[in-house]
Each structure stands twice: as C-alpha cells, then as structure tokens.
Amino acid sequence: MGRAKRTIRTMEEIIVTGGKPLNGSVAVLGAKNAVLKQMVAMLLAPGTHQLRNVPGILDVVLMGRVLEHIGATCSFDGHALTVEVPDQLRPEAPLDLVRQMRASIVVLGPLLARGGVAMVAFPGGDDLGARPIDMHIDGLRKMGAEFELEHGVLMARAPRGLVGTEIGLEFPSVGATENVLLGAVLATGETTVHNAAREPEIEDLAAFLTKMGARIQGAGTSVITVEGVDTLQPTTHEVLADRLEAGTYAVAGAITGGEVRIERCVPDHLRMELRKLTDVGCTIGRGDDWFTVAGPERPLPVDFATLPFPGFHTDMQPQMVALLSVASGTSVITENIYDARFRYAGELMRMGADITTEWQHAVIRGVEKLSGCPVIAPDIRAGASLVLAALRAEGQTVVGDIHHIDRGYEDFVGRLQSLGGDLERRPAGAAQ
Ligand code: EPU
C-alpha cells in the first residue's frame, strides 16, 4: 500500500494533433465530487474506513493531505483508499491546504459535530467567481454554532453541541447541503433541510453516512430530514460513477465525429446533457450502466442554461461550448451557477472560435474549423474542453497548466489515446 504521497507533476503540457475521430470504449471511475465529501465524512467516526472506485486524481491526494493534517492516515492501493481516523482530531484546515482544496470547507460540519470546534481558513474566490460560503455558515449557525472571522481564519464553536432544527437554503447549494448534513448526523434531535441540493453525489454521501449508522431520509430530493444519532461506525463503500468524466468523454466522441461507448456509469445522471447532445445531432444509445454517443459531421446549434441538478450541469458547460464552437449556426448559453465561468472563452477564441460573452450569457457563432495553437487551462472543466477542441482543430495545440485537468481526470491523455486521439504529455516547454 502506498501512502497518500503521490507524485504531482505540475510542469507538464499536453500536445494534441487534431483531426482524428475518436472511437472505442472507456470505463469511468468514481465521482470526484462524491469521493471528496465521503473522505471528509469519515472524520465522523474513529476507526478504519475504506472507499473503492476512487479516481487517481490530484484533488483526492489533496483531500488526503487535509485529512492527514487533521490526524487521519490515508493509504492508497490502486483504486481503493483506506483511512484510519483517530479518536482525537486536530480540528483545523490551514490556508495552504484550503487554497489548494477549496472543498476542505466541508470539514466544518464534521469537526463541529465531533468536538464542537473547527478552525478553517476562509476560502477566497477562484477562477469560477467569488464563491461565498454564507449558506454553509447560516445553516450551521442555526444548529447552534458560533462563528468569528479572525485574521482570515473562520473560528467555529458549538459550545452546547449541534442541535437539530429547520434550515431553508436560499439556493440549493451542493456544499452547504453537505456541510449541514455532515453536522446533522451527530446532532441532537431532528434537522430538516429545505431547498436542499438534489445532486446524485449528495445521495451517494447520504448512502455512505447511512452505512455508518446515520438516519437520513429524502437525500436526492429538495427536503432532507436527519435524525441525529450518538455515534457512527467506520464503513466500506463503492463511490458513485463520475457523470462529469462520462459526459466529457461523450463530448470527445461528439466533437470529433466519432463513436464512443461510456461504461460503468449512470446515464440517468446525465439526462439533460444527453438530451442536448441529441439536439446537436448526436446519435445516443443507452443501457442501465452504459451509453454510446456518435457525433455528427458538424453539430447543430443549441441553446441551454445551466441549473442545479437535474438541470444542465455547469461543469459540462465548457465542454459543450467547445462542441458548439464548430456548429453550423449560433447558440446562446446562459450560466446560472457561477459569475465568472466564461473566462476560458478567450483561449477558445485563440483557436478561432467566435464567442461573445456578456454577464452570464455567451453567444457562440459556429465556425467551420478551429486551428491549433498554444492555450492555457484555467480550471478543471475548461482545461478538458480545450483538449476536446484541440482534438477537432487543424494542426497542433499545446495546452499548458494541465495540473487543473489532473485535479479531476485520471489519465486523461491515456484514455483519449485509447480512443484513438493523437495527443501526449510532455514537460512544459520541451522542444517539439
Ligand atoms: N454559493 C453561495 N453561498 C454559499 C454556497 C454557494 O453564494 O454559501 C454560490 C456559489 O458561489 C456558486 C453557487 O452558489 O456560485 C453554487 O455553489 P455550490 O455550493 O452549489 O457548489 P460547490 O459545493 O462549491 C460543487 C462542486 C463543483 C460544482 C458545483 C455545482 C465539489 C467539490 N465541487 O461546488 O464542482 O460546479 O458543486 O454543481 O463538489 C468541478 O468539479 O469542476 C466543480 C467546480
């Protein structure tokens, strides 16, 4: 078994030669946005936990560091992750870790529930926008927690423990729903979350917590009820399939005019995205845990707006924009989740895309062809979308800052190569 110290290769780039249709099949791994929260949930019970189907991605390594800072020990064996959680926790997540792993903010709930204290560096904004955490704080405050911001550190205390109550979220925030859920499972009495996020990853977190002994009803709907219990036990769980990894490979097939089969996934979790792929002219086939996408020669334009689940996922928006950049007409996209999610459009425009953005709207006038050039990956999904655009583009594209892609995709290059893509990783700035 290896410790949680995996190599982090930051100074690399991906070089892509476009023009080849992608064909073949690819099996997806566990969902990044499920596994990260399940790792944090382990803090609720001392002992040995195990997660299976854990993707080999940078964010899992970084969350492992957060857990180790708090006192846990993480070890990887292939796609299995074993975590030993001690009786006594060090209830803090310092700035250097929170900066690298924004999702660390969800340690607030479990740390308050376990020991009544948490010190978490206040996360700033990122490439997607300001990303406030007011709903996390309001929810836990209603349960009896007190918060003070001191020198950039959020000091949280629950002197009388967390107490169940009614919480209405202003917006179905994924992170706020999770933080409240993670606090409520060990709280005194019943907590009800209204307007809860309905994402499949929340359902999977609830399934994990239920195996630990939690009493939760309604996960996956907008009203979640939790009956607090005194203690929880360690458990073993297979992480839900990553719908975003599945969706990204689907667009890889679509944008190159190839045919890709995506296996070990839940097509029902991508209903809206598959509907839009059908609208652009893709042919979709599907079973319970697989689907196929055959791309048209040239996509048709479509309009869509991103929304919380079951709406079109914001984390599939950049990949879809790459596809629509070569459509036979004009598409209008509305981004409703983040206030700065179109920053990558400038990089796509360097490749010849014709995109105008204003506030949360993007107008994409499809062009006949894209042409390869050097571009920079600004975040996980935008990074993936630039690689997808490059697979369609004429000539060579060099994608820099690919550590962003490594945060969310295991062996992205290898998997696209296995589908016939002409691309490779190399040290940044290496001679061609
Ligand atoms: N928001 C607030 N106040 C809050 C919480 C959220 O204003 O207290 C706002 C955010 O600023 C954002 C919106 O509400 O504009 C949605 O935020 P949400 O809390 O739903 O998202 P999150 O928990 O921060 C998770 C995923 C994101 C994914 C979103 C939306 C993880 C680790 N991250 O973020 O994933 O985009 O849900 O589905 O689960 C990615 O995987 O690339 C990624 C960014």
Image: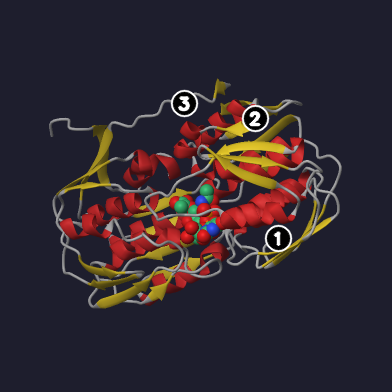
Q: At 28% from the left edge and 31% from the top edge, which residue is drawn?
A: 11
Q: Earlier in the sequence, mark 1 or mark 3?
A: 3
How dense is the environment of label 2, judged by Cα within 10 Å: few (below 14), some, or many (20 and up)? many
Q: Secondary structure at mark 2?
A: strand
Residue for badge 1: 219
- The amino acid type found where label 1 is placed reads Ala
Q: Position of residue 251 (x, y in %)?
A: 36, 60
Q: Is residue 432 above or below residue 167?
A: above
Q: Earlier in the sequence, mark 1 or mark 2?
A: 2
How dense is the environment of label 3, judged by Cα within 10 Å: few (below 14), some, or many (20 and up)? few
Q: Secondary structure at mark 3?
A: loop
Residue for badge 3: 6
Quadrant holding the N terminus = top right
Q: At 65% from the left edge and 64% from the top edge, which residue is drawn?
A: 196
Q: CA distance from mark 1 to mark 3?
A: 33 Å
Residue 144 at least partly seen: yes
Q: CA distance from mark 3 to mark 2?
A: 15 Å
- The amino acid type found where label 2 is placed reads Thr
